[in-house]
Structures are given as structure tokens and as C-alpha cells.
Amino acid sequence: METTKSHIALLASPGMGHLIPVLELAKHLVSHQSFKVTVFVVATDHASLTDTHILQSPADSGDLLDIVLLPFIDVSDIVMLCTPEIDRKEIDEHVKNRKPLHIPGCKPIKFEHNLDVFFMDPNDPVYQGYVEAINKMSLTDGILVNTWDELEPTTLKALRETKKVPIYPIGPLVRPIEKSVFGNEIIAWLDKQPKQSVIYVSFGSGGTLSAQQVKELAWGLELSQQRFVWVLRPPTENDAAGTFLALGNGSDATPDYLPDGFPARTEDRGLLVPMWAPQVEVLSHTSIGGFLTHCGWNSTMESIVNGVPMIAWPLYAEQKMNASMLTEDIGASIRVMAVESDAAVGREEIRSVVRKILVDRQGRNIRSRIKELKDSAANALAKGGSSYNSMSQVANICIQHLKTKASGA
Ligand code: UDP
């Protein structure tokens, strides 16, 4: 018997970091809320969809989940919900005099933790585009947010008070562990390591480091004498988001941009993974004891859901704000400090943070705090939890809306 399902269209904006949670939302709407869903994917570079199984509909979704790849677009010249509400003088003080930025109801953001300055310059097309997009958000019937009430109560309260539209925290939306179609050798290697002994190092789907920074990181990992899995990309200079537009298939397993002899000296306790790892599977492995991360939001959620303490090493976009929240507000990470702004992070600093998160006494609070956050995330998603209830509310509103439309009211 054919059933008539309400049909939802979702649009995933460019970048893996946007695509992954939208696909998770789609799967959730299909499996828990009985909708039919079509996800339209705006691709910036088909090569960046290296992990192509991400785009395959799960077998159990039948014909209820369609994924449509839209034509490639160039976003090379192209989030902040409160930008239009912030006083102009306040922004000027922030940009020119590096004073903390006061956002209504939120903790002030230090200059060094904020987005690049061009996001704050009213004469810059990037700023103008953001303000226009954010103003349009106020015209919507509601905003779904990939977080949960217990994680960010202050920010969510401020958002609810500032915005005229309902805010629905429905997270954490994290990919489930899948039987990986690749990377089995990484899991096999992790199987042989002691529990919580390995640091996982990755800078997201596109983050890269300078050549000097790659060398310092390698030295820091070696000096820490700890086990590691490092997703390694070729260095780029002056462009931390360097590989968003140029992910290759990564066949170079022993690159010359590492210190001489590094792979050989660390082969008994380190694994270099070229370009891309099955991150969710890695983070959920019992051998993982820490995550050196660029603090992309998906990586952050994946680490919390798996109870893995973090070392925050933000690179670009909103990552410095995430790092500040993780370190100063919720106590889930320690932060890597450059000796001075824009300088490479030194090997001694890296050695020290890796040891702190994995073995030293100083890391104990973070290691126990992350377990509380893991439980809090699970509770939010469980039946009757805050995010579960938000999602049910959204589903009910959609169904009610469709019924009203169908009755012609
Ligand atoms: N990811 C992965 N393997 C990698 C690098 C990244 O599976 O080697 C996934 C990661 O699990 C996360 C996403 O890519 O779901 C990256 O999103 P995030 O928001 O952390 O960072 P972005 O890539 O947007 O900077």
C-alpha cells in the first residue's frame, strides 16, 4: 500500500562541515519523524566529496531520502546571528581598539577570538552579505541549531531574547559510526593500542598548516612520546583553509615536508594518514585519549559525543570562538598558545599540551568534564530529552502547517 508522506526539502550549503549535519538531520526526519526528505547539495568542488559514501542514502531509508547534487559553484569570494543588533560604535571599538565585543546576553568576545576583521567592516561586501542573510533569517518560521540547551544555556537564552523567531536546539547532530568503506587499516592499528593512549590530530575537511608549522607539530608529537594518528595534508602558506578547493586523493604517505627521519623514528607509535580519515570511527575507538582539533563545529560535536577531551587549535572562520567556548566556558579542552600572534606554535608547547591531555595530572579535570558532557549530549537526544523534544516540536509544526494548507484555511 502506498503511503503519503509529508515531503521536506533541505538545502546544504557548500562545505563538508555543512553537508554532514544536514544529512544527519535528513536521516533523523526520515527515521524518527516519518517524513520524506530531499537534500539539495550545493557542491563547491566534487573532489571535496572524496568521502563519497557520505552522499549515499542509508539502505534503511528506502526511497524516503533523496540526495540531489546541484551544479558546482565557485564560493572562493564569498554565520553571527546578532550582527545587525550590535551597536556600530561597539563594532568600531572592537575593530579599531581591539576592545571585547559585547553581544546582547552573551559573554563578550575578545578581539583575538573573533572572526577575521573583514566580517566586521561595514564597507566590506562580506559583512554586507552577512547582515542581509541574517536579516532574512528573522523572516523565517524558526531556526534549527546544532547544539543542545544544556551545553549552551546562556547563548541560547540570548538568541531567544534577541530573535523574534523560535529557536530549536536539536543537536548534537553527529554521523553514526558506519562500517567504513575505507580506513580499515587505521582501525586495525588502533585496535593494537592501549585504551585512551592515542592523540588524534586533524584540522577538519579543509584545514592546512604552513610548512614550518607542520615541522613543529611533527617535532611536538615526537617529543611528547605519545601515540598519535595524524591526518596529514601538504602545507600551504597564508591560507589555513587551503584545501577546501583542492582535496586530492592523498597518495603521499612519507612527504618531504616532515622533519628528516620522522616517519621512521615514530613508526612504532604513530600513524600518518594522508588527507582524510574516517573521523567518527576513529573518535569512537577506545584507544583514542585526546583530539587535537581545529574546533570545527562537527569535530567539536563528534568529540563530545564520544567523550574525547580536546586540544583546541583553531585556524579560521568561527573556530577561535568555538575554541574559546570549549576552553573557557565548558572546560572540554585546553588551548594551544602561539608565543605571539601569527607565530608558529612551537614544538615545546605542542609536546606539553599533548602530554597534558593524555597523561599529566593537569588534564584530569578536562578528562572527567568531557564524560559529563558526553552524558549530557546523550540525554538531550534520548526520548524526552531537550533536543528530542525540540525536534518533535518542529515535526508537529510542519505537519500542522501542511494540514492547514491542505484544508485550504
Ligand atoms: N572529517 C572526516 N575525516 C577527516 C577530516 C574531516 O571524516 O579526515 C569530517 C569530520 O568528521 C567532520 C567534518 O569532516 O564531520 C568536518 O567538519 P568540521 O565542522 O569539524 O570542520 P570543517 O571541515 O567545516 O572546517
Image (cartoon, rainbow, N blue to C red):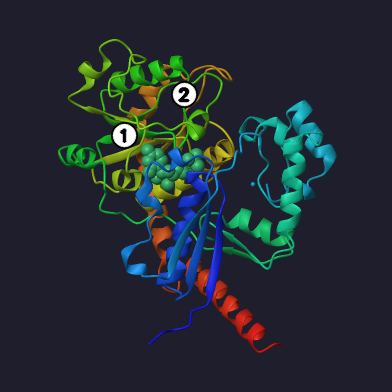
Alpha carbons under labels 2 and 1: distance apart: 18 Å
Residue visible at 39% across and 34% down in the picture = 202
Q: Which mark is residue 379?
A: none
Which image quadrant shows ligand 1? top left
Q: Which mark is residue 199?
A: 1
Percent x, y of residue 95: 75, 30
Count of labels shown? 2
The relative height of residue 355 versus residue 409 in the rendered view (above or below) is: above
User: Which residue position is annotated with label 2?
Assistant: 209
Question: Which quadrant would the N terminus be assigned to in this image?
Answer: bottom left
Q: What element carries label 1?
A: strand
The residue closer to the viewer here, 275 or 327, is 275
Residue visible at 49% across and 51% down in the picture = 19
Name which residue type carries label 1: Ile
- Number of residues whose C-alpha sits closer than 10 Å to that of mark 1, classed few (under 14), some (14–19) or many (20 or more): many
Furthest residue in direction right, as rendered:
89
Residue visible at 70% across and 58% down in the picture = 137
Instruction: Determine which quarter of the picture holds residue 153.
Output: bottom right
**Is residue 268 shown left or right of residue 380?**
left
Name which residue type carries label 2: Leu
Q: Is residue 330 visible?
A: no
The relative height of residue 62 versus residue 277 in the rendered view (above or below) is: below
Furthest residue in direction front, as rendered:
71
Residue visible at 44% across and 38% down in the picture = 47
